[in-house]
Amino acid sequence: MSRAIDLVIADVDGTLVTDDKRLTPATTQVVAALREAGIRFAITSGRPPRGMRMLSKPLGIDTPLAGFNGGVMMAPDFSQVVAAHDLDDGVIGRAVGLLDDHGLDAWVYTHDRWLVRDGAAPHVARERRTVAFAPEIVGRFDLAALHGVVKIVGVTDDEARMTSCRDAARKAFGEGVTADCSQPYYLDITSTRANKGAVVDALAEHLGIPHARIATIGDMPNDVAMFARSGCAIAMGNAEHDVRRKAHHVTVSNDEDGFAEAMKRFVLEGRRG
């Protein structure tokens, strides 16, 4: 790198943590090294803010946490909401109906609630372990009473069904809504303002750091938006080809300490440039 980096923004799942959702010693050590070098560190994720709490203390997070792909930004001590971008009420029922029509399970997230209709459905137990809190089992969604919805997730392990539903959602909702995969089995439906590119913009303004001096790192298609808004974009080795080719650099996988390796090679070394 020819320029110094003043801020690193990292995705969480598939990037910062291993496949079994662990922070490795190498990761915590390299984040401390970033701080010692005067480089700010922030995280953004499709997770709800509550599901990022367990990362905040071990990593010493002192920047706003961008949950729901930026749908809700919380103060680092979780004392207040810094910004929120809810889905329009008119989108909620249509989105749930579209997921149902394509055979995807639907989950609904508000700022502080996770609602599911079937607690035994695929990936519910896994997600519960990941975010460290339980969903509310509602049987059916009371769509008339649902307000302040930040994200609706469609869940399936069927790749063809996922692709078809994603494309249908993009066509149905147009520019006001983002429909993208945060994991191969999760389709996240959020406000257009809730995307990781907007997270870069918000943190750049909040911290007074130019985009050119920001590094971003991630592994999924929803990370590409932040790649485009940063001076240094790094893809994980476990990312698919279309994600890797949108980045300036590619590191090894999240199970090989790819995050730590990337920080050493592409960020910390750049401080000497």
Image (cartoon, rainbow, N blue to C red):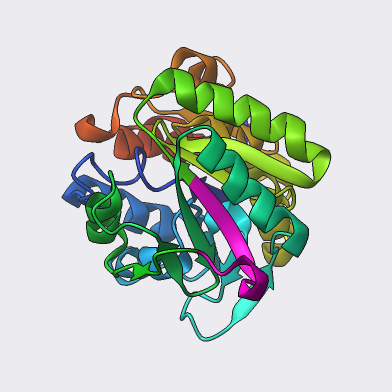
Q: Image check: 233 left or right of 28?
A: right
- Displayed quadrant of residue 263: top left
Taking 211 as reference, is 34 above or below it?
below
**Could you tell me which residue is drawn at 64 percent across and 25 percent down?**
167
Taking 105 as reference, is 206 above or below it?
below
Residue 92 position in % (x across, y down): 66, 57
**Could you tell me which residue is drawn at 39 percent across and 59 percent down?**
117
Taking 46 as reference, is 87 above or below it?
below
Residue 189 visible? The answer is no
Q: Image check: 13 left or right of 271?
A: left
Q: Quadrant of the C terminus?
A: top right
Residue 3 position in % (x across, y down): 63, 34
**Could you tell me which residue is drawn at 51 percent across and 35 percent down?**
181
Residue 78 position in % (x across, y down): 48, 80
- Displayed quadrant of residue 16: top left
Q: Is residue 145 magenta?
A: yes
Q: Nearer the viewer, residue 122 or 112?
A: 122
- Magenta segment range? 141-153
Q: Is residue 56 magenta?
A: no
Q: Nearer the viewer, residue 259 or 198?
A: 198
Q: Nearer the viewer, residue 138 or 228?
A: 138
Residue 15 visible? The answer is yes
Q: Image check: 144 left or right of 52?
A: right
